[in-house]
Amino acid sequence: MIDERKQHILQAVIQDYISSAEPVGSRTLARKYDLGVSPATIRNEMADLEMLGYLEHIHTSSGRIPSSKGYRLYVDSLLPVKPMTDAEKAIIDKWYKTKVQRIDQVFQETAKLISKMTKNVSLVLAPQISKAAFKCMQFLPLDDHRVIAVLMTDAGFVENRIMEMPDGASFEDFQRMAQVANGHLSGHTLETIHTKSLKQIESAIGDKGLYDSAFDLISKALDSDRRERLYLGGHHGADDAAGIPQCG
């Protein structure tokens, strides 16, 4: 951890760079911020901060800008944090109670709420579904030939798809398969459900067509997890685009 004087200088550099988007020099800091030291001392401290990786020097004649390491320290330790007011807590509580019905809406509405309260663009990255534990698999009848398959995790993630029933299969067969799958897979994270575990389900079910249906559902959940789900919250007229997941 850097000493207190370096922390104050780094904080001043970052705040000035955020407001001006221009490299920051020692004379600028001495003039605009009450750091209690001379421009020469500030210049030496900035050189040390650069050597430590907290600042970067783009051009020889220019000032310095924060590095990723500098921003990280600023966010973790130097950024002033004000406690939320009771009014802000009430807004958050009301927002989630009235707007969130599904787990995916948590991320979408969180992005919007952060943007609304900070008056800045916000990005929320959803956690990977593969890290969540399998909770249960369910099937709902759609018509005589199709079912809606639903996979749920302990974190509340839901993956669903419409499946064609194999020839000769009934909805009761799918219910039986769900019971077998739930008994074998409950508590395992999706990424640790190996082919061996699924083969045990196939053996217990005794029907390859039904097994393929279960395998397809789990595979789809894992495939969708390979794309990062990024939720954007905008402000100043950008709210129409807020919360739209961007798949990379």
Image: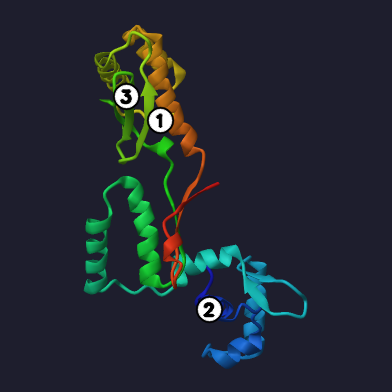
Within-10-Å neighbours for mark 3: few <14, some 14–19, many 20+: many
Which residue is at the far bottom?
31
Q: Can you say whether 163 is above or below 89 in the image?
A: above
Within-10-Å neighbours for mark 2: few <14, some 14–19, many 20+: some
Q: From the viewer's perspective, is 10 left or right of 40?
A: left
Residue 103 % position (x, y): 32, 46
Sequence-wise, the earlier of marks 2 and 3 is: 2
Helix, strand or loop at label 1? It is: helix
Quadrant housing residue 145: top left
Q: From the viewer's perspective, is 98 left or right of 113?
A: left
Tally of numbered discs: 3
Residue 119 % position (x, y): 41, 73
Q: Nearer the viewer, residue 3 or 32?
A: 32
Q: Callout 2, which amino acid?
A: Gln
Q: Callout 1, which amino acid?
A: Leu
Give the residue pinned by disc 2.
15
Q: Can you say whether 144 is above or below 93 in the image?
A: above
Residue 166 % position (x, y): 38, 13
Residue 67 % position (x, y): 61, 66
Give the residue pinned by disc 1.
190
Q: Can you say whether 213 is above or below 187 in the image?
A: above
Helix, strand or loop at label 2? It is: helix
Give the residue pinned by disc 3.
147
Q: Callout 3, which amino acid?
A: Val
